């Protein structure tokens, strides 16, 4: 991993890399991330590899852990987004069932 003494520069990650980090932390699969961001699955995989290289991580779970620990993504925002999406999906199903 990047040395903890040097701190992390938020700008080391692109906007898309941060989006991929967040979506992956929310539990999205590569295909879902690709659909959400309107990019190919190959691009998602390449961006994940770039993140692992930038953060010198052995696997993508380590990237997520590091991003959470360094404040690159917030667990509260991840959970809030995930549960608000889930609630929205459930409401759509209820509305469809009532019609």
Image: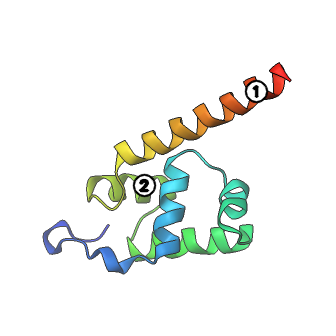
Nearer to the camera, 50 or 36 = 36
* Residue found 67% across the figure and 35% down from its top: 89
> Which label number is shown at residue 95?
1
The image quarter in which residue 93 lies: top right
Q: Position of residue 22 (x, y in %)?
A: 48, 56
Q: CA distance from mark 1 to mark 2?
A: 35 Å
Q: Would you say residue 59 is visible in this rendering?
A: no
Image position of 56 with respect to 30: above or below: below
* Residue found 52% across the figure and 38% down from its top: 84
Q: Position of residue 80 (x, y in %)?
A: 44, 40
- Rendered-image quadrant of the C terminus: top right
Q: Residues within 10 Å of mark 1 (few under 14, many from 20)?
A: few
Mark 1, secondary structure of its residue: helix
> Which label number is shown at residue 23?
none
* Residue found 58% across the figure and 40% down from its top: 85
| Left-right relation of 67 to 28 | left
Q: Would you say residue 28 is visible in this rendering?
A: yes
Nearer to the camera, 26 or 57 = 26
- Identify the residue under disc 2: 64
- Rendered-image quadrant of the N terminus: bottom left
Q: Position of residue 95 (x, y in %)?
A: 76, 27
């Amino acid at each position: 991993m990047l040395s903890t003494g040097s701190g992390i520069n938020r700008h080391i990650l692109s906007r898309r890399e941060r989006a991929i980090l967040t979506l992956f932390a929310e539990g999205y699969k590569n295909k879902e991330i690709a659909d959400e961001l309107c990019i190919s699955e190959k691009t998602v995989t390449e961006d994940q590899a770039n993140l692992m290289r930038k953060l010198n991580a052995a696997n993508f779970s380590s990237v997520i852990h590091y991003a959470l620990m360094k404040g690159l993504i917030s667990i509260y925002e991840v959970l809030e987004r995930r549960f608000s999406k889930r609630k929205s999906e459930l409401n759509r199903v209820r509305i469809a069932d009532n019609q």
